[in-house]
Amino acid sequence: MSSIKVECVIKQKNQIGESPVWEEKDSSLLYVDIRGKRVSRWNSLTNKIDSIATENLVGSVVPRQAGGYVIAEGTRFAFVDWAKRSIKSVAPVDKMEKPNTRFNDGKVDPAGRFFAGTMGLDIKPDVTDGALYSLLPDHSVVKQLDKVHLSNGLEWSLDHRIFYYIDSLAFMVEAFDYDIQTGGLSNRRMVYKMEKDECIPDGMCIDTEGKLWVACFDAGRVLRIDPQTGTRLQTVKLPASKTTSCCFGGKDYSDLYVTSACIDLDADALAKQPEAGCTFKVSGLGVKGIPAYSYTG
């Protein structure tokens, strides 16, 4: 086993860093700062960061096949034209239904649909105002799930038959049978129940062995989970307690990039973890990830 190395590679502090996506064509990491209301691209070769401000809290960003990006922002899906520095609304989700919500984490499925979920702005354990939506290539929106506390990590199995999902305040990773033709979900079940010290499950990604990597908010770690057996295979600790999400990237997708948050940390906590809110690269894991899918609409 090669030795694992954790380094802080993006020093820019995000209030809530989220939604990391590796862009192979220019060796860049794309991510958002939810509270900072910005989408950023960090070029790993030049170490330069380029950002675009968003109007509302921005939960996630994904690449778009036609160029630019799609964001789940506030209560809408929108297209980002990076060259023109412009953001254009594509589809609102029904704000009348649950006014006090915002988009959170999202990801593109293997057929090019953009899945993203919402959460209540006022997080309470008994409030389930969130939902999971998908933006189809024709720009229509389908509600996939409702009665969600805090929609978060999402991923698909390597054979595209299973959809993995995290509703953070359910404190577990769940699975659904997935119909790649229709984007439909069925047969909901639990895959992994969080241990107490693993705190809150947040973003996740998959490796080429079909194992899930789950970032644990408030626990400063990423877990490697076998979704077939429901067992934890590995724990990687990070120097920031509020780890939010992760994705594979770098040369042949062998590095794990992990975003974090510094929100709600007092002066004492910030002094103990000066890299809170930064983005980390974990190398030497001995596993690889797969490239992100792009939205096809």
Image (spheres, rainbow, N blue to C red):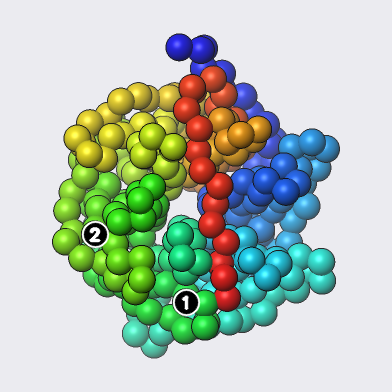
Q: Residue at x 48, y 44 (%)?
A: 245
Q: Would you say 5 lies left or right of 225 here?
A: right
Q: Which three-letter amino acid code belongs to the residue tagged 1?
A: Leu
Q: Would you say 144 lies left or right of 56 here?
A: left
Residue highlighted by disc 2: 177
Q: Quadrant of the C terminus?
A: bottom right
Q: Are marks 1 and 2 in contact (CB under 8 Å)?
A: no
Graded by Cα atoms within 10 Å as few (under 14), some (14 to 19) or many (20 or more), the crowding at tag 1 reads some
Q: Residue at x 63, y 66 (%)?
A: 64
Q: Earlier in the sequence, mark 1 or mark 2?
A: 1
Q: Residue furthest bottom?
A: 96
The kind of secondary structure element at disc 2 is strand
Q: Quadrant of the N terminus?
A: top left
**Residue 82, disc:** none
How many numbered markers are drawn?
2
Q: Judge whether residue 215 can be spotted in this image.
A: no
User: Does residue 134 lie above or below 53 as drawn?
Assistant: below
User: Does residue 254 lie above or below 249 as drawn?
Assistant: above
Q: CA distance from mark 1 to mark 2?
A: 19 Å
Residue 16 picture location, percent across and down: 54, 49
Name the foreground residue: 272 vs 107: 107
Q: Quadrant of residue 89?
A: bottom right
Q: Residue at x 83, y 37 (%)?
A: 46
Q: Judge whether residue 200 can be spotted in this image.
A: yes
Residue 234 picture location, percent across and down: 35, 24
User: Does residue 167 lie above or below 252 as drawn?
Assistant: below
Residue highlighted by disc 1: 136
